[in-house]
Image: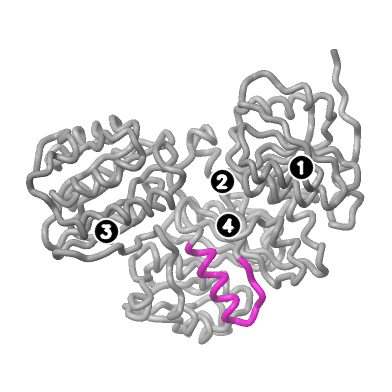
Amino acid sequence: MGHTVAVRDLDNLTSWHSEWRGVRVVILGLGVSGFAAADTLLELGAGVLVVAANAGELRREMLDVIGGRFVEHSGSEVIPKQLDEFDAELVIVSPGFGLDHPLIAWAQGRGIPIWGDIELAWRLRDKVGAPAEWIAVTGTNGKTTTVQLTTHLLVAGGLRAVPAGNIGVPVLDAIRDPQGFDVIVVELSSFQLHWMPRSGPGAMAPLASVCLNIADDHLDWHGSRAAYVDAKATVYANTKLACVYNRADAATTRMVEDAEVQEGCRAIGFGLDTPGPSDLGMVDDIIIDRAFLEDRHNSALELTTHGELAAAGLASPHMIANVLAAAALARSAGVAAPTISSALSTFRIDRHRTEIVVTSGGVLWVNDSKATNSHAADASLRSYDSVVWIVGGLLKGVDISDLVAGHASRLRGVVVIGLNREPVVEAFARHAPQVPVFEVDATETGDVMPQAVKAAARIALNGDTVLMAPAAASMDQFTDYADRGTRFAEAVNDYLEGGADDDDPAPASPATGAP
C-alpha cells in the first residue's frame, strides 16, 4: 500500500517567525537534545511525536505536560504503527542515532527530510532579536576544553557568550534564552555534523570555525575514515571570518583548502612551532599571535608564556594546542591580545581531563577518563615519562596497536579494564610483550576501579604516574566517562586512606607476567 507525505515547503522555515504551526515532526531520541527539540517545536505550535528506545520517567512526564506524544521503539525492524498514522513531514534525529537504525531507513524510504538538532537551532536562531554569532568547534579530541576556553576568553572580552552543543546547554536552549547572546560557542560531534547541510537554508554559517585534529574514532558509526573526515570537514562550510586549523594535522589543512567559505574568510593556522604570518604558535616558551595584527609579516603579539600556562594547568602539548585554537577563535571575534593574556591565567580545565587526583608516596594519580579514544590517550601518555596505564573499555572498532607500540618504552605496567579486554591484551602481547599486563575481570561496576587501583598501586614506583586514560568509551561498564572518572578518583582515595595490605589477594590476573 502506497504512503504519501503531505507536501510542505520546509525551505521556507528559516526563522522563529516562520509558520511552524501544525508541522508534523517525529523526533528520534529523548535525551538532552531530543527533549530540547521537542520543547522548542511544541512552543512553536508544531505537532510532535517522540520515538525512543527508552526515556527517563521525568522526561516522559515533562513531554506529556508540554503536549508531546511518546512512542517506545526498541530498535527492531518493526516500525510502530503510530509513526505511519502520524504522517510525519519532518524527522529530527538526536546525535548518535546510528545510520543503520531502522527508523532512519524508514524516514529515508518515505522521503521524509531528516534534520539534526543543530540545523533546527540554526533556522530558529532569531527568536530574541538579532541572532548571536556562532563559533563552531569540532575535532577528535580537545573540543570541550577548547569550547570552554573560547567562551572564557570571549566573556573576558566583554561579550555575552555561552558554551553549547555537546557541552553546557543544548543549542536549542541557548537560542531561546530570553537575555540573548552575542556569541554561542558550539561544540559539534561528527554525528551532528553528518546531518548538517553545507548549502541551502539550513546550512550553518559560523563567524569562525575549527577542526582541532583528526584521528580514527566512531568508525563503526560512520562506516569509514573517509566518511568520518568528511563529516568533520562540514564545520568549515560557509565560515565568515576565520577557518582555524592545526598545522601539525594535514587532514585539517586539506579541509580548509577544500572548504566553500564566505568572501573575506581567512585561514588561520595554529601549532607548537614558530608561526608564519596568519598563524598562532610558539617561539621558545612564548605563545605568539601573528594573525590578528596589522603588520603580521614583520611583527607579532605575545599572548602568554609556557610558564604562565603551567601555573594554570595548561602546559601539556595538547593543552597548549587547545589554548592556541581558542585564542585564534577569540581573536577573530575581536578580543584584544592583553585580554587573552590575563584571562588565560584564570582558566581551569574541566574535570576528568588530565585531572590530578592526588600525589602519594611519590606516585602521581591522574584521571583522564575523558580520553575516550586512542588520539586522546596518546596525548595524555606523552605528558608523562613513566606510566602505569589503566586502559580499556568500549573500543568502537578502533585498533590500539599503534598506541601500544608507540608508548611501550614509557610503561611500567598496564591494567586492562572493560568487558572485552582481549583486543587490548593481544595488542600488548604482539607489540609490547615486555610490559607487564594485568586484567581486571570484575563484572560489577562497583568493583572495577577498586581492583584496577589495587593492581596499579602494586606496580607503581616512586616517580611514576598512574594514568587512567582508557582510549575507549565507558558505556560497557559505566554510565559515562564522568562516572568512570569519579569512580576512579574515589577508588584511589579509598585505597590510599585505607592503606595497602600486602596480604591482599592479587587484585587482577596477570596476562603476560608479573612486574
Location of mark 4 (residue): 187
> Image quarter for residue 333?
bottom right
Q: For the residues marked 4 and 1, what is the alpha-carbon distance in whole angstroms?
A: 29 Å
Q: Which residue is mark 3?
A: 493
- Residue, disc 1: 64
- Mark nearest the camera among 2 and 3 is 3
Sort mark 3 into few (<14), some (14-19) or many (20+) by Cα contacts within 10 Å.
some
Hey, what amino acid is under mark 2? Ser
Residue 155 included in the magenta stretch of the image: yes
Dot 2 corresponds to which residue? 190
Q: Are marks 1 and 2 in contact (CB under 8 Å)?
A: no
Which of the marked residues, 4 or 3, is nearer the chain's N terminus? 4
Front tag of 4 and 2? 4
Tell me if 472 is positioned left or right of 226 in this view: left
Judge whether residue 212 can be spotted in this image: yes
The residue type indicated by label 1 comes to Asp
**The image quarter in which residue 80 lies:** top right
Mark 2–mark 3 Cα distance, whole angstroms, equals 36 Å
Q: Which mark is residue 277?
A: none
Task: Tell me which numbered mark, 2 or 3, is placed earlier along the sequence.
Answer: 2
